[in-house]
Amino acid sequence: MASTLNGKIHAPGTCPGSKADARGGTGWRMDCDPDMHVKMCKKIAQLTKVIYALNTRQDEAEASMEALREAHQEELRDAVAETEARLLQDQGRAGQEALLQRIQALESALELQKRLTQEALAQSATCRLETKERELRVEAEHAERVLSLSKEMLELKADYEKRLRHLSGHEAPRWGRLSQEGPDPKAEPGCGPEMREVLLEVERLRVENQQLSKDYARKAEELQATYERENEAIRQAMQQSVSEALWQWQEKETDLRKNFQVQESALQAQVRKLEGDLEHRGRKISDLKKYAQKLKDRIQDLDVQLKEARQENLELKSTAKKLGEKLAVAKDRLMLQECHVAQKTDDMKTEQVSESEALGKENGLEARSLHPQQDQNFAKECPCTKGGTYAQTKKEADIETEYMKRQYEEDLRKIKHQTEEEKKHLKDQLVKRLEDLVKKHTVEIKSVRSSVEAERKRLQKEVETQLEDVKKKSENEIKQLEEEKAALSVKLQNSLLEVLRLEEFIQQHKVCPPRGDDRSPEVDCQHCSILDTQDPCLKSNEPSQTLPRGEDHQDKLAAEEGTSSDEEERIEAPLKEGGDPLLPLGSLLEEKAPEIQRLREEWQSQKARFQAQISQMQQALEQCASDHREDLRELRQLSEQERGQLQRQLQETVQQNQATKAQLEASHQRALRMLEKAKNQELKATEERLKKESSHSLQIQHQAHRLELQALEEKARQELQGELERVQAQQGLLLESLRQELSEQRAACSEHQKDLEALQAELRALGSLDQRQAITLSPGDSEDHAGTAEEAGSPGQTGSPKGAAEQEPREGCGLREENSELKEEVRRLQAEVEQHQQEALQLRDQRKRLEEDQQAQRAREVELLRQEHRKEMQAMVADFSSAQARLQARLAALETEPKDSGEKPGKGASRPEDVQLIGRLRTRLKEREEVIRQLTNLGKSRLARTSPPCLRTLRPLFEALVRPPCASCFG
């Protein structure tokens, strides 16, 4: 305002200093703003270049990661394809693994049973602990609920009693005063009984709560007892069923033992089959080794690429740090520029002050010489103009500096925010890509494993089917050979019997006794030779070769039988007619002597031929048996050697695969650990920040709540105090007014008594004649006098009864309101008690429903377990019975073979092996029976403590026990 007034009073050229200062300040400001603007633009351009470079690097890193990912996926696909091809080639490995597993199964049966029993016991213990914990938890929750309800009831009762005491303390003097004045028949007599009713209701509710808690405890005990009874019944039933299962499994095991020797032949066939695959597998193993080496190289390349990606990430982080440092340097430069600008402004201010002082002095001298009065005004107002321009320039400079500071700070914030967002975005992208890679690796590994497992199962099934086919074919061939053997033996016996019959017939019908005596030893010798030839034919049991020319021999025997029968008929005809037997016999013998000689010669030749054939057959059989045994020994040795080589090669490949897998897992785990560390650090930082913010906000809220509560409490206290003081003042005023009324009434009564005494004295003074009239009239006069006296004294006393009459209805209304409030409070308490009762009933219903659901679920589980157990038992019994039948048949065959071979003279060297085999089998059977007896005893002693779910683990145990032995036990 002073500068505007001076500009109006003085001429334009009177005060040029202020205008020059203003022009200088604005010019400097215009000079300073473009420089700062250019500098800021340069900084912004540099930052945009840096951001663009970061973005381009990020895009390049993404492209490289995408290329690496695609290459890795292609390599994984190639690896999967190659592994599938290798797996298709490696079809025999599953069979070897199955054989090894069968070899180890019998040895680990006892350990498996012990472990399974321990696991079953542990499972039962955990189930019991869980049920007990669940019951304790439910009981604790119910007890807490009951305690909370009882605490609420006690708190309500204490509050109610406190209010009653408070009201009784406030109303006791008033009721006492009213009782002294006189009982009011219109007062409410229901306060005391209502309070008693409320107290009785509270006591009744407490008793009901105690009764409910007792009922709940009783029901819980009953449920526990029923649960224990059901568990005991289930345990006994399961024990009985398990004992029956053990007995059935014992029978089944005896059946399964009969399959052992059948499997021996199958294993021999499999050994022959595996011989051709060994060389092929060796080549495959070498190929797999090469492929594993390739995979190792590829893994190393991937590790190198991962290291390069990490290095690029570190370089990006270092560039970000450098940018932060550059921003800090730019900030320092701006601060220095601000200081320089401030110094310049101070210098300009000093210069402006000095110039303004010099101009002021010159203007002052001119003004004094021209206008002395204006000099005084100018002296008064010029400092104001100077001060105004200086302040204005200072304000403008401060505003400009503040604006620049704000703008710079905002730019810095934006740049920091952008860099942080970029960093977070890069980290998130890297984390996501690494997670995707890890997931893909895991998925591909799982798929490869699943495919390998499926291929292994398929190969195992194919091998089993092939073994079954070979087994069936061998059995059929054995049956056919046995049938042929039986047919040949029958035919040979028939032919020998015919020959013997002919010899006996010829011996009986000899004519000359000396010739008969001479021929008898020959016949005996022939009979012995026939028996000798019959015994090895009957005792030979190996049907390796059939008899040569068997059909021709049978035809000849049939022809001889026919001729012999014709001769017998011809000889027996005359004997039957009853003539002399010697004559026809002699004639017949003479006639048939050349025929008999011919027959004897033919018989001797046939006998020699048969003996030669039998000896050839025996030699051929022995040669075949020895060749077969040597082949078996050589095959076993070769199979053992190749098995050892295959096992070693498998171990080596497994170790190499495990090493590669360990390296891959280690690399994956390192990457995951780095990612987890980064994530954990970020999460910890964010959690700490959020915790600090939340704790700070919570503290502020708590403090605000505390202050509000304190203010409300103070306000309520003040209001209650004021209300109490007002009520006490009203009660005091009421008592004072009542006391005044009582004193006035007493004074009026004393005056009435005085008037009555005066009237009585006047009436006594009257005559005896008018005494009765005076007596009759005296009450009316006294009443009139009393009424006049009262009328005379009433104007002074009308004020106090009217005030009392007005105050009494107010007090009555207040008491009625308090009484109604108390009744409402009692109703509210009753409603809350009913609500608590309803909640308790709901809790009971929920408890019952939960118990019923649990019982139903247990019953369903028990039924399902029983059904599964029945099915498993039926299947096991069927398998066991079939295996037992086969094993018994095989044992019977093995027992009969040594008996037959013991009588054979040429087979004494090879039969002890079969005897040893039978002895081994019997010892194995005895050991198995002892083990099964021990297991049944352990099961009977321990199954009383096991839970029903343990039955699920018993089937693998007995399957392992009844699994057939390996081929080494027969070797």
Image (cartoon, rainbow, N blue to C red):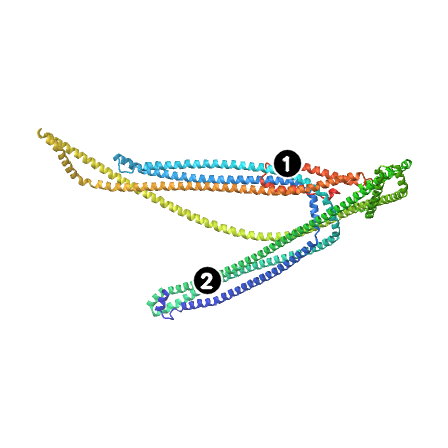
Reading the image, the residue beneath label 2 is 403
Q: In which quarter of the image is residue 621?
A: top right
Q: Nearer the viewer, residue 384 or 865?
A: 865
Q: Earlier in the sequence, mark 1 or mark 2?
A: 2
The residue carrying pointer 1 sits among few (fewer than 14), some (14 to 19) or many (20 or more) residues within 10 Å by Cα, namely few
Q: Residue 883 carries which label?
A: none
Image quarter in which the N terminus is found: bottom left
Residue that sits furthest to the right in the current view: 514
Q: In which quarter of the image is residue 250?
A: top right
> Does residue 463 appear left or right of residue 598 in this picture?
left
Q: Where is residue 774 in the image (x, y as percent from the top left)?
A: 11, 32
Q: Quadrant of residue 563?
A: top right
Q: Where is residue 927 in the image (x, y as percent from the top left)?
A: 70, 37
> Does residue 761 appear left or right of residue 514 in this picture?
left
> Does residue 127 appear left or right of residue 481 in this picture?
left
Q: Nearer the viewer, residue 24 or 277?
A: 277
> Does residue 103 appear left or right of residue 572 in this picture?
left
Q: Residue 938 carries which label?
A: 1
Give the CA separation, mark 1 to mark 2: 93 Å
Q: Which of 596 and 912 is in front in this view?
A: 596
